[in-house]
Image (spheres, rainbow, N blue to C red):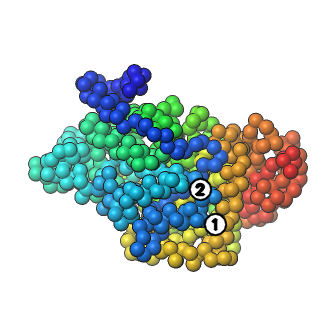
Amino acid sequence: MDIRTKSKIRNRLNRIYKKNLSEDWINELCDFIDERKNKTPRKRPGWDEKQVFLITYGDVIKRKGEAPLHTLHQFATDKLKSMISTIHILPFFPYSSDDGFSVKDFYAVDPELGHWDDIESLETDFILMADLVANHASSVGVWFKQFREGKKPGRNYFFVPPDDFDTTHVIRPRSSPLLTEYSTVNGPKKVWTTFSADQVDLDYSNPELLKEMLSVFLFYMAKGIRVVRLDAIAFLWKASGTACMHENETHEVVSLFRDVMDYCYPGALLLTETNVPHRENITYFGLGDEAHLIYQFALPPLILHALHTGNGSYFTNWAKELSDPRRGTTYLNFTSSHDGIGVRPLEGIMPDEEKLPMIEKLKEFGARVTTRQLGDTHVPYEINVTFFDALKGTRDGVDEYQLDRFLLSQTIMLSLQGVPAFYFLNLFGIPNDNEGLEKTGVNRSINRRKFELDELTDLLQDNSQHATILAELNQRTGIRRNTVAFSPETQQLVIDLGNEFFCLLRKTDRMEESVVCLFNLTNKKQEVVLPAGLMEFCRDMLTWDLLNPECIEMKPYQSLWLRTRFMI
């Protein structure tokens, strides 16, 4: 390892552990990292307009007698190859709860899904993203079994706060107990459980645990993973009397993962998952030395509010305030994922008198609401609903524009600066899975439907609504992937045309290659005039219609991608 990299890692460790590590231990860790440096060039994610992510479970599609990972590979190759560059396979490890996010063995593939060979085969056709479930592990997993039995290495891997640990200011993402008691060979122990009794928090004050997680991190990349998502990373470090969230040590750990990635697998990408208010979320860019990518957690609820009310003022004001990320970093734009639609990201952006009526209306559309503990009360944390059914209507009730609203929402996502990510169910406009919800009793199950291959094939028969949605998204994504204005590096300028519209300019160095993205957020026809001098006659890339920017007539919930006449 070169002197500069070793010095950087040493400085990170000294800031995390307050210079309490021996030089020998630090040198051993550096040697450990150096031995795992990639020697063979592998596919790199790249960083341009062609990057489009898919978020999916490894067993979202099943076929009898076949490993689900293989079935997913075949389906993605046959149906999605032209629109998707990168597949985020949600935790595919042996687990005990939360559909994968309570990992029992970090080094194994769940045999119900397939094997490492299936992962490596997928990597030949797509860039792969995987989760490093960094904050916690399963209560019935390999390490926690060792913890309870007092055996190495797991006996010191989990966080047991001392009796005088002050939890007064801890910020909770759940309403479940913060501490859970388990029996061990050394008597009962109260362990820290941020998310559930089955998801026991790891103890990063133990440097051996940090080394173990770096080993897992490098193991995944050796298997072909080129985008790593740090799950629930904000809760990593615990300190008495603090919020136990976004601690300085947590940011240093993220930077350490970034340092190791850049050294061992240059070109790979680091994504942090921090479902928190926007101003807190963007701190995980650091000084360009933490995450390459952060989720736009405020985006889904802002789009919902704009389309429920026909008023894009909160959305437009938020977008105006987005700063251009540092070069080499950007946003991951999405409208839904395997989790619910977060409410906390709206803090400081939208008042409760706007937010709470939207939540109540979503309940009418079949949504469930998951709460978190705030002092002595429980407050909304996330809305559990498919994004398609979240757009079933407006604040006035259900109407005939569900499909139009949904397509507009996905087109906004494709337009914004950053990298877009489709959740698997959104590719087809899948409604709420009430049967799955009833079966599990878990709110998130409403948006985690899985399919038999024949069942999904039937849903995608010609002229079905699901097939129409896939075809439309395929076409729009194809245009995006061939338009340089949609590169993450391209400037984004928000144009305020009034509450009924959302409009932005994706500006390149050459105006004739720039794109004006214009959206009618209402259920009424609208006329709009673009700012004078922005462009002369223009053509909509989605329909190829020629338009006059001095008077553009828009249908309800219509999307336009406008380029100047010079490209006609």
Q: Residues within 10 Å of mark 1 (few under 14, many from 20)?
A: some
Residue 7 position, x and y percent, is: 38, 22
498 is higher (above) or lower (below) than 246: below
Q: Quadrant of the N terminus?
A: top left
- Location of residue 401 by image quarter: bottom right
Q: Nearer the viewer, mark 2 or mark 1?
A: 2
Kind of residue indicated by mark 1:
Leu
Q: Secondary structure at mark 1?
A: helix
Q: Which residue is mark 1?
A: 470
**Residue that lies at the very extreme toward the front in this rendered image:** 40
Q: Residue visible at 68% across and 40% down?
A: 490
Q: Secondary structure at mark 2?
A: loop
Task: Please indicate, yes or no, whether residue 547 appears anywhere in the rendered image.
Answer: yes
- Location of residue 145 by image quarter: bottom left
Q: Residue visible at 29% across and 48% down?
A: 201
Kind of residue indicated by mark 2:
Ile
Which dot marks residue 84? 2
